[in-house]
Image (tube, rainbow, N blue to C red):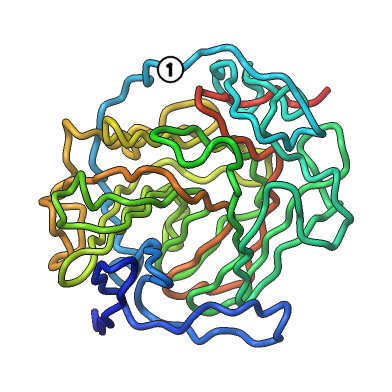
Amino acid sequence: MRRSLVLWLAAGVAIFACTSSPRTDSEATGEEEAAGDGGEMAGGRVDDPDFASGGGTNAAGSGGIRTEPPSAGASGGVAAGGGTSTTSTGGRMAAGGAGGSGLSCAELSNCDSFEAYASGSRPAGPWTAFEVSGGSLSVDETRSFGTGKKSLKISVSPGGEMLARMQHKGTGVLPAESLYMRMMVYMDEAPKGSGHWNWMGAEGTVAAKSGGRLSNAYVGNGGNLTGGSTWMIYAAGANGGFQDCFSAASTKLPTKQWACFELYLDAKTDRALAWVNGKPDDLLSVDAAVPLAGNCVPGFDYTNGKWFIPRLEKLYFGWRMYHTLAAPAAAWLDDIAIGTTRIGCPAAPR
């Protein structure tokens, strides 16, 4: 794969990244950013990199510790401020499936069902730093998971390096050493093309814990454009390049239904766990005791497969496509929640 590296200086630390221009909002400017191979760094921020062309799928994947983290199953929070309060929240552990025993958005103190925003607009409340290129991101009434009428629709056009995502402010929660993230997702069909994408993840510093080998790191989960299965993605700025790693699972992305996706990140133990509809996505479970050696792009592995989970400073929700999307893709996100204990999957509305 052809890559070019550009030196960036951020906070006095030299970081390298693949060449790319700053992202623009195509909805505001009407311009789509050119496709390209490579990751993204801007202002010292490291986003997830590109992987081997054709998706870079590792069919076997690589396992990790398959047990629940100790904090799973804690009691839930209390709704406040229309489900967008800034207090961290817990949740009940899901019994399995999208109709699990986790708390609904109305019962949580840091959850957004998008009911408070005008249709066709971008959400406010806890959301900021919208990145849209070659697509759109807005509140929509086509479908919703809960008892309301709205959700967040993200869509992207065919092409490369497409974006339709936003950051969660995490007020009162960030920065955090560990965090749970949950969202309900509806897709008519899985995105198709050559490459991969992510839609839920976090970023922060790893310089101290990596002994200076890495700077900022991003960890997120998403999917494989070539096979419609789930992924875990890891990227970090490094002295001389960037860490470029992944873990691929055989779990197929659910379509034509509301599905529950959960992610747990722990900087203290370097654990990253994922669930789909309340069930562990085992090949996406990363643990310090099981380094993912061999699941890094050759020449872009500075820690022998070790994933240093960062101190969590930024949270991202929405699509970041890599390589080439072959056809238009759309998804609806609802009941997005964050918390310091396992939130679980909400029961389907009656």
Q: Give neighbour class at mark 1: few <14, some 14-19, many 20+ (Cα, 10 Å).
A: few
Q: Is residue 96 left or right of residue 237?
A: right
Q: Which residue is mark 1?
A: 71
Residue lying farthest to the left in this orientation: 304
Give the residue drawn at x 23%, y 61%: 243
The one nearer the camera, 250 or 125, is: 125
Give the residue drawn at x 17%, y 46%: 306
Give the residue drawn at x 66%, y 23%: 99
The one nearer the camera, 180 or 15, is: 15
Residue 21 higher or lower than 43, as above or below: below
Q: Quadrant of the N terminus?
A: bottom left
Q: Quadrant of the C terminus?
A: top right
Q: Amino acid at mark 1?
A: Ser
Residue 17 higher or lower than 291, as above or below: below
Q: Is residue 328 left or right of residue 316?
A: right
Q: In the rendered image, which quarter is residue 260 located in?
A: top right
The one nearer the camera, 233 or 310, is: 310
Helix, strand or loop at disc 1?
Answer: loop
Give the residue drawn at x 47%, y 69%: 193
Q: In the rendered image, which quarter is residue 196 located in?
A: bottom left
Q: Is residue 269 left or right of residue 305?
A: right
Residue lying farthest to the front in this orientation: 12
Residue 56 at x, y = what percent?
29, 63
